[in-house]
Image (cartoon, rainbow, N blue to C red):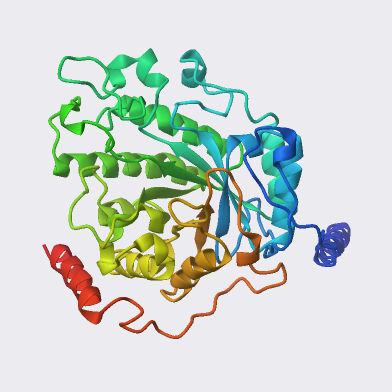
Amino acid sequence: MKVRKLNFFILSGICLFIIAGRANSEVNPRLVVLEQPQEENDIINIADTTILPYIKLEKKAKTKYIRGIHLSVWISGSEKHRKIAMELFDNTELNTAVIDIKEYEGQVYIDGIKIVNVNGAYVKAIPNLEKYISDLKEKGVYIIARIVVFRDNILTRKKPELAVKNPDGTIWYDRKGIAWLDPYNKDTWDYNLKIAEKAADIGFDEIQFDYIRFPSDGNTKNCRYSKPHSAVEASKALVGFLKEANKRLKSKGTKISIDVFGLTTTATDDMGIGQKIIGMTEWVDYVSPMVYPSHYGKWNYGIADPNKEPYKTVYLALEGALRRIPNEKLRPWLQDFSLGYKYGKDEVEAQIQACYDNKIGCWLLWNPRCVYTKSALKEQDAENTYQESDPPTPEMLKTEKTKQLIIETIEQKNSL
């Protein structure tokens, strides 16, 4: 018994020493930017970024507020670019990596999944993935696997019976020539969930389902499915998929999130894609509406040009969301790219502040090239919290009448 007590105290002392050592470790002062590389010299160094360190109490990282970035396969697949990403997490408030595991062309970047390999979808683009995950966890980074669900150009060609069809029975393609899996077909559910399960098994903290919707771009009137299609049935199918995902992933201790169109936070229908945010939220831990101001049309929310009004656009979108789903489940994607209007420090900060003014502390930044605005982020030693600004005035939000119209529309729909 004395020996056991002695061993316990020795082990406790070692653990305290390790924790103290980490707490006093130096932070690399070099600051970097990530960019999807075309060549090795596409990655360049710039100044000013920040990460919030936090103690990793268990195998999976813990933090109060998730603040992350998307990392493409091109960033995750190169040892050099991995190191650059590590420097980013060492020196910015960012504490979360969203890593592509399955893309919209259908490529899958995890090996060892039989149905994926049989159908030729595996691409060895991220070597030593498990080591990369381990290295990120050592930094205290929360790791999310992004899986594009129903947009898939590989499985649809290998197994046409799983694809969305034209009236003549041929495969339907969207405007970019990409085919879609039939969201009603449970074999397509199983295929994607096998990928999700494997991602959970190798250490991802969370699975994020993207393109969890029906097709929208192209002549969707020609779309034919394996069962009669309607807005009600489409919404039921997506909720059914998430319910099955919850059943299969929660037993592994893995969190689940979804990406949805930005307008789902205030739309009064399924937008023709099956996404009804309330029903979908029940089965996931986080909902990430893509509230990119550039993706809103003129006069959405009463704003003449939403792309030029990032604070107003994001504020109103999230205010609408909070009338439908819990605050703790909201974790929006914010715009850190330019599309029709130049975005920089002010525009990114404005969107982040719009989150905080809605009492939403979590957010993710999206840039298709993985180039992020460091000057919009806090420094490493900043608290993992947020500061609200003064409440926005009716003038800031265009007019009180516009705001009230949005609120009344949402409340009317939710009462149905």
Q: Is residue 142 left or right of residue 242?
A: right
Residue 122 position in % (x across, y down): 54, 21
Q: In this view, does 179 lie to the left or right of 195?
A: left
Residue 210 is at least partly visible in this image: yes
Residue at 28% of width from left, 45% of height from top? Answer: 239
- Count the numbered circles shown: 0
The residue lying toward the viewer, choosing from 341 and 316, is 341
Check the picture and name the quadrant holding the N terminus: bottom right
Residue at 22% of width from left, 69% of height from top? Answer: 406
Residue 135 position in % (x across, y down): 73, 45
Check the picture and name the quadrant holding the C terminus: bottom left
Residue at 18% of width from left, 72% of height from top? Answer: 405
The residue lying toward the viewer, choosing from 412 and 353, is 353
Q: In which quarter of the image is residue 223?
A: top left
Residue 62 position in % (x across, y down): 61, 60
Q: Is residue 174 left or right of residue 232?
A: right
Q: Is residue 253 left or right of residue 316?
A: right
Q: In which quarter of the image is residue 58?
A: bottom right
Residue at 69% of width from left, 49% of height from top? Answer: 137
110 to 29, vertically: above or below:
above
Residue 361 is at least partly visible in this image: no
Residue 295 position in % (x across, y down): 36, 52
The residue lying toward the viewer, choosing from 155 and 352, is 352
